[in-house]
């Protein structure tokens, strides 16, 4: 499984979590303020986790591009 596919799966799960948390927040706003706030917090955290994962993947790709020319030189030297 490649990185992009794995990121898509994680994003899908976070979307599901975020949607459920939004629903909980809306449905409990008048009945249970604490539960409603927890739903809102889960939404925010899911969004922050998603952003952090994308930033890590982006950083990894940038560093990998920097390393690939070095690896190509080493392979040419070996042969």
Image (cartoon, rainbow, N blue to C red):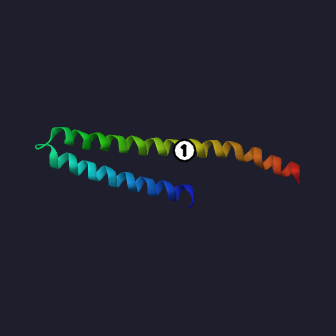
Q: Left or right: 3 with respect to 27?
A: right
Rendered position, 25 above or below 16? above
Residue 26 location (% of width, % of height): 18, 47
Q: In this view of the protein, which residue sits in the foreground, 57 or 34?
A: 34
Residue 9 location (% of width, % of height): 45, 57
Q: Residue at x 49, y 53 (%)?
A: 7
Residue 51 location (% of width, % of height): 43, 42
Rendered position, 62 above or below 6? above
The quadrant of the rendering that contains the N terminus is bottom right
Q: Residue furthest left?
A: 30
Name the residue carrying label 1: 58
Q: Residue at x 87, y 50 (%)?
A: 78
Q: Residue furthest bottom?
A: 1
Q: Left or right: 58 with respect to 65?
A: left
Estimate how packed mark 1 is, as few (under 14), some (14 to 19) or many (20 or more) residues with alpha carbons within 10 Å.
few
Q: Left or right: 47 with respect to 63?
A: left
Q: Left or right: 5 with respect to 74?
A: left
Q: Residue at x 50, y 41 (%)?
A: 55
Q: Residue at x 22, y 39 (%)?
A: 37
> Tag 1's secondary structure?
helix
Total residue callouts: 1
Residue 79 location (% of width, % of height): 89, 54
């Amino acid at each position: 499984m490649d990185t992009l596919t794995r990121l898509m799966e994680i994003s899908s799960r976070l979307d599901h979590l975020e949607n459920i948390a939004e629903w909980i927040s809306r449905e409990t706003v008048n009945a249970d303020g604490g539960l409603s706030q927890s739903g809102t917090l889960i939404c925010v955290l899911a969004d922050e986790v998603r952003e952090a994962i994308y930033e890590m993947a982006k950083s990894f790709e940038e560093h990998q591009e920097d390393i690939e020319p070095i690896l190509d030189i080493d392979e040419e030297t070996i042969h």
